[in-house]
Amino acid sequence: MRPLFQQQIAFAGLLVFTGCTELPYLASSRVGYVSTIYSEEGLRRDPPECLRALAEPDLQGTKYVEIDIPHGRVHERVFAQLSPSVNVQLHDRVEFDPSNCSSGTSPEVKMVLTHH
């Protein structure tokens, strides 16, 4: 029979390897929930302040969403464009890059983590 400490080490190793596979997103990315999906027409009529500076070519064929990032009682709202390969629905949990409108670039949704 194996000594108890060898069993504990084996169990701890199993937990470590299992834990590593549960986080598909990158350390530099952020995670939030899709709260609004904007159409091209909606962005032309009444764009959110952050997206008002977009030129017409930036709107054509590009989808934008609003992402809700909960921080306890406070919620942060971020506007992001969708990668062409990403299809989202309301309330999907998504990974996006952390750039912001004040830097002149809009964040981009990289992947859907869970569909709702």
Image (cartoon, grey):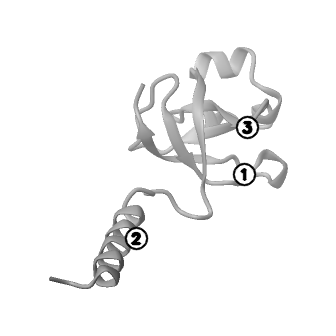
Left or right: 66, with 83 as reference point = right
For the residues carrying marks 3 and 2, which lies nearer the camera in this image?
Answer: 2
The 10 Å Cα crowd at callout 3, few under 14, some 14 to 19, many 20 or more, is: some
- Residue 16 numbered mark, or none: 2
Could you say whether the residue bearing mark 3 is in a helix, strand or loop? loop
Say which quarter of the image contains residue 57. Answer: top right
- Screen quadrant of the N terminus: bottom left
Which amino acid does the dot numbered 2 rest on?
A: Val
In the depicted structure, whether residue 14 falls above or below residue 45: below
In this orientation, which residue lies closer to the viewer: 99 or 49? 99
Q: Position of residue 106 (x, y in %)?
A: 69, 46
Question: As shown in the figure, which amino acid type bears the numbered disc 1?
Answer: Thr
Residue pictured at 35% horizontal, 75% vertical? 8
Q: Is mark 2 on a helix, strand or loop?
A: helix
**Percent from the top left, x then y, of residue 26?**
53, 62
**Quadrant position of residue 73:** top right
In the rendered view, tell whether residue 77 sits above or below residue 110: above
Q: Which amino acid does label 3 sit on?
A: Leu
Q: Position of residue 34 (x, y in %)?
A: 57, 29
Residue 76 vs residue 2, the one in the foreground:
2
* In the image: residue 40, left or right of residue 85: right
Label disc, if present, on residue 54 of the rendered structure: 3
Sequence-wise first label, 3 or 2 = 2
Q: Nearer the viewer, mark 1 or mark 3?
A: 1
On the picture, is 22 further left or further right than 4?
A: right
| Residue that mark 1 sits on | 105
State the quadrant of the C terminus: top left
Q: Nearer the viewer, residue 75 or 63?
A: 75
Q: Left or right: where does residue 92 sit relative to residue 71?
A: left
Quote the CA–CA distance across marks 1 and 2. 37 Å
Mark 1 or mark 3, which has the lower sequence index? 3
Across and down, in percent, residue 5 comes to: 35, 83
